[in-house]
Image: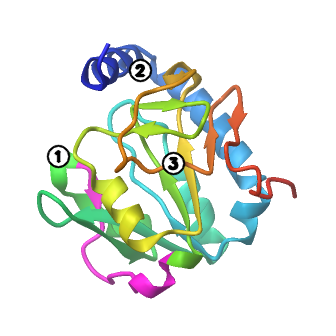
Amino acid sequence: MNNSELRKMVLKQRDKLTNDIRHKYSLIIFNKLRNLKIYQDSDIILCYANIKSEVETLRIIKDALLKKKIVALPKVMDDTQMNFYIIKNINELQPGYQGILEPSKNLLDNTIIKKALMIIPGTVFDENGNRLGYGKGYYDRFIAKYHPKYKIGLSYDMQIKKSIKTSAYDQKMDLILTEKAMYTPNTSVDKHN
């Protein structure tokens, strides 16, 4: 099975999860994330606004804002590029690219991204930290260009495979959180409180 077929298969399975199950699993994942030392110690959080059946991130965004962290979300600029914009409030987000909630002002200073914890969606992950996105490469290009300090993938356990094929352009996660497990391919990540 090639990556395109794998992506379609996993998304079809993920879309079958009920709203109640997604809410339940997302809450478990949120609680795991907020208990991580790297989350607690990070002053800059790059997050995403979930869409469709992705792991929900509203709690994460609100929690980070409440803790006075710098919170930034992506805005798609064109077919190859996205930038992150700082938000102070959830109400600043408006539907943008493919209906995804996006910020519109306060561009994040790219020089501070090297200190940021980046929380990343995906379609398929593997136990070694590899990730398949949606096929457009926005996150891979952004990570390769700006090198955030930590990269955490959020996923339901049904999206995790033993191993997936990747290309030289695909960026690895330092950590992947699911409702059932924590995959830590980067053993230098300090996960404890």
Is tag 1's residue or tag 3's residue first in the polypeptide sequence?
Answer: 1
**Kind of residue indicated by mark 2:** Arg
| Residue lying farthest to the front in this orientation | 168
Kindly state the secondary structure of the residue where label 3 is placed.
Answer: loop
Q: x and y percent of residue 153 in the render? A: 53, 45
Q: Characterize the local packing of mark 3: few (<14), some (14-19) or many (20 or more) Cα atoms within 10 angstroms.
A: many
Q: Is residue 112 magenta?
A: yes
Is tag 2's residue or tag 3's residue first in the polypeptide sequence?
Answer: 2
Is tag 1's residue or tag 2's residue first in the polypeptide sequence?
Answer: 2
Q: Is the residue under label 3 in contact with that under label 2 (CB below 8 Å)?
A: no
Residue 14 vertical placement versus 69 (above, below): above
The numbered disc on residue 14 is 2
Q: Left or right of 104: which side holds 61?
A: right
Q: x and y percent of residue 145 in the render? A: 36, 70
Q: x and y percent of residue 152 in the render? A: 58, 51
Q: Which residue is mark 1?
A: 98
**Kind of residue indicated by mark 1:** Gln
Q: Which residues are magenta?
A: 100-113
Q: Which residue is mark 3?
A: 172
Quarter of the image holding residue 182? top right
The numbered disc on residue 30 is none
Residue at 76% in and 50% down = 187
